Amino acid sequence: MPIDRRTFLGISTALATLRAAPALAAAQAATVEAPMRRKIPGTSEQLPVIGMGTADTFNVGRTSEERAPLGEVLAMLLQRIPHAVIDTAPSYGNAEVVTGDLLQAANARRNVFVATKISSGAPNAIEQFTQSRADLRSDVVDLLQVHNLIDWQNNLKLLRQLKAQGKTRYIGITHYREDAHDTLAQILRTEKVDFLQVNYSLAERNAEKTLLPLCEERGVAVLVNRPFQDGRLFAAVRGKPLPDWAGEIDCTSWGQLFLKFIVSHPAVTAAIPATSKPKNMADNLGAAFGRMPDTRERARIAAALA
């Protein structure tokens, strides 16, 4: 469905305002090094370690009031960290079409790495993917994933065909729960995929045991979902002051500590926190810059949460 004039003007205003104003994001970008990037294994392509998810946050309607904050969030990403991952799915309500509309309004499709998913059984997968490409306004997606292991054997075969046809550049599998990790590990051992998307955070470290080492061994890129465990990590530190030593790794918030713990793991390619709030987006993006924690500092971050 085409974007209406009022919505387009609202989004365009948000984008133009952010680009023109001496915003916090621009000020920070001018005083730090380039964002940290990681190579997609087996390629020369690099991705910024902080991207953006769209689950829940981009499931909005068509009015400018609903979409303008998301336009500002996207503009921050484009301004500070171009070519970052934007992850979405047809099962996220309106997220794909909102993502497509915002990228079109910003003329920015080439400046992001778009990842989406197949979230239906194989008989309906082609129809679903056709709709996804229309909603995203993109003939080719950068990454197409089997969502939450849905009909994964058949869908992986389809994804390989779509990759061979040039309709996606990379393929992968996803899940967001630890009880799926054993199945994910078995797939990594027996199937060739380019990406794994999995839950990993200070509160959910099971991926460290098998999945992350397997990805390093097999040359599989890793996207991390649920980096804040749906906000539970912030609840755990509510009222606790940020440790003085956080500045040693260029962190100014608990959120940046949480994200740097994740992306400093050598197997992780990028974390994809979702937000609809520009203030939170600016904070998340800060985790891509500055010094990263080493093994000792990662242990100190983990201990601070205990």
Image (cartoon, grey):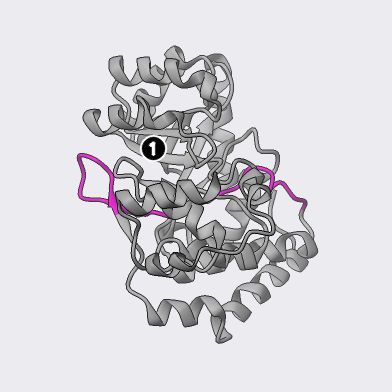
Q: Tell me if residue 280 comes above or below residue 32 in the rendering.
A: above
Q: Is residue 190 visible?
A: yes
Determine the residue positioned at 68% across, 55% down.
238
Can residue 107 be seen here? The reply is: no
Task: Kindly identify the residue that appears in the image at 33 percent across and 60 percent down.
Answer: 36
Name the one closer to the observer, 107 or 260: 260
Q: Which residues are magenta?
A: 38-61
Where is 272 relative to 167, above or below?
A: below
Q: Compare residues 201 and 295 and report the one nearer the observer.
A: 295
For disc 1, the marked residue is: 168
Pick the quarter of the image with the C terminus.
top right
Q: Residues within 10 Å of mark 1 (few under 14, many from 20)?
A: many
- On whether residue 269 falls in the magenta region, the answer is no
Amino acid type, residue under disc 1 in the picture: Thr
Looking at the image, residue 177 sits to the left or right of residue 239; the answer is left
**Left or right: 212 with respect to 58?**
left
Residue 90 coordinates in the image, percent (x, y)? 61, 35
249 relative position to 294: left or right: right
Magenta run includes residue 53: yes
* Quadrant of the image occupied by residue 103: bottom right
Q: Residue at x 59, y 21 (%)?
A: 120
SS under mark 1:
strand
Q: Position of residue 229 (x, y in %)?
A: 60, 41
- What kind of secondary structure does the magenta stretch mostly adopt? loop
Q: How many marks?
A: 1
> Is residue 47 rendered to the left or right of residue 228?
left
Q: Where does the image place residue 105, in percent across and percent down from the top left?
A: 59, 65
Q: Position of residue 219 (x, y in %)?
A: 24, 33
